[in-house]
Amino acid sequence: MSGRRTVYEIYWEILVYCKSPRLFTSIISRCDLNSKTGQEYLEFLAGKGYISKVTDGERAGYQSTPAAGEYIALFSSLYQKLFDKNPGFRL
Amino acid sequence: MMTNTLSQFKTEIRHFFLISLLNLVFAAIAIAIGVQYMVTAILGQTLDPFIPGFPMIPGLRMLSGAIAMICFGLGISWILTTVRIFEDIVTIKDDLDKDGDAIADERLTCLIVRMLAHYRDNRKTVRTMILVCTLGGLCFFVLGIANSIKVLTISSGGFAFTLDNLLLIPAMLLTLSISLASLLSSWYFSKFAQVWDGRLHEIGESECALKTKLGLDDQ
């Protein structure tokens, strides 16, 4: 996803994408990040215990932990709540 | 909650798509009519009896030629701004239609995030579009009136006008309907902008909950 996003939206996107193990390059390409900021985001999420490093043979990747589920659920409920009510004018 | 959210989101995206499409069509017609009125204003001149070979330029024709030129320019600007908005809306709408009603919770959230990101990127463009649509609507309104009037006499006692030709009425109606369509889409765009600004504000407020969840509230 590209476009102007908040950090919370980027965290959510990384966590959802990493539900199955993903390579660093796939993550930054999918989330439209450069390698420096991508690394920073992943380090932050790993520090909070929302993402962990996994190795599959020689390849090292990242995967969301069960703890990330709470953040993902909260994020989804907050964003979906935006469309709970009518926009206030007739469509 | 998700069914309600999905139907509301779908309705809004579809309406935004339709208004953008309507804008594209009318912007194209605006360019065509602008050119047509300009050519008519330039070529449809009678020769001046006092200056041989020089066309007589009545004030009303000159006015409609100038307004037609403005309409042509606004039409081009109108089409360019609409295309920018339209492209992304089409992608979101297509993805929404492809997934149908069985859309996953995360997929729906992803599309909402995409729409918010798209709005953040195009906030200024939407504002320009509101302005261009309003100006275009007003110009076409004046053009529709000016081109159907043959003679306009203004005196201290009031004013009188003569319609040029009955055949001009369909053209006048088309011009007026373009002006109405552009004013209507400008109104819809401003309403959408208002709602989306409100949503961005709401997201800003709910970021506190996300901050707390990430343990950032004490930093």
Image (cartoon, rainbow, N blue to C red):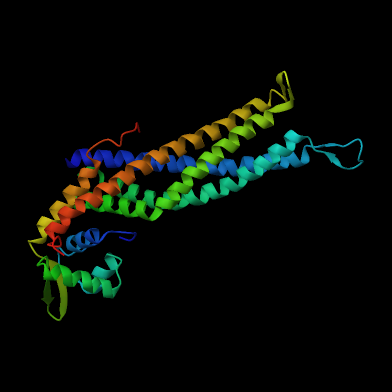
- Percent coordinates x, y for residue B47 in the rendering: 86, 37
Q: Residue placed at 15% from the left, 65% from the top?
A: A20
Q: How many marks?
A: 0
Q: Is residue B130 above or below residue A71?
A: above
Where, by quadrant of the figure, is residue B100 drawn?
Answer: top left
On the picture, is B16 further left or further right than B10?
right
Q: Is residue B155 above or below residue B98?
A: above
Q: Residue placed at 15% from the left, 53% from the top?
A: B209
Q: Residue furthest front?
A: B156
Where, by quadrant of the figure, is residue B2 drawn?
Answer: top left
Q: Residue placed at 92% from the left, 37% from the top?
A: B50
Quadrant where the C terminus of chain B sits is bottom left
- Percent coordinates x, y for residue A32 in the rendering: 30, 66
Can see residue A42?
A: yes
- Percent coordinates x, y for residue A91 in the rendering: 35, 33
Q: Residue placed at 51% from the left, 51% from the top?
A: B80
Q: Which of the two residues, B64 or A63, is positioned nearer the viewer here?
A: B64
- Percent coordinates x, y for residue B207 in the rendering: 20, 54
Quadrant where the N terminus of chain B sits is top left
Q: Residue furthest bottom?
A: A58
Q: Is residue B196 above or below residue B212?
A: above
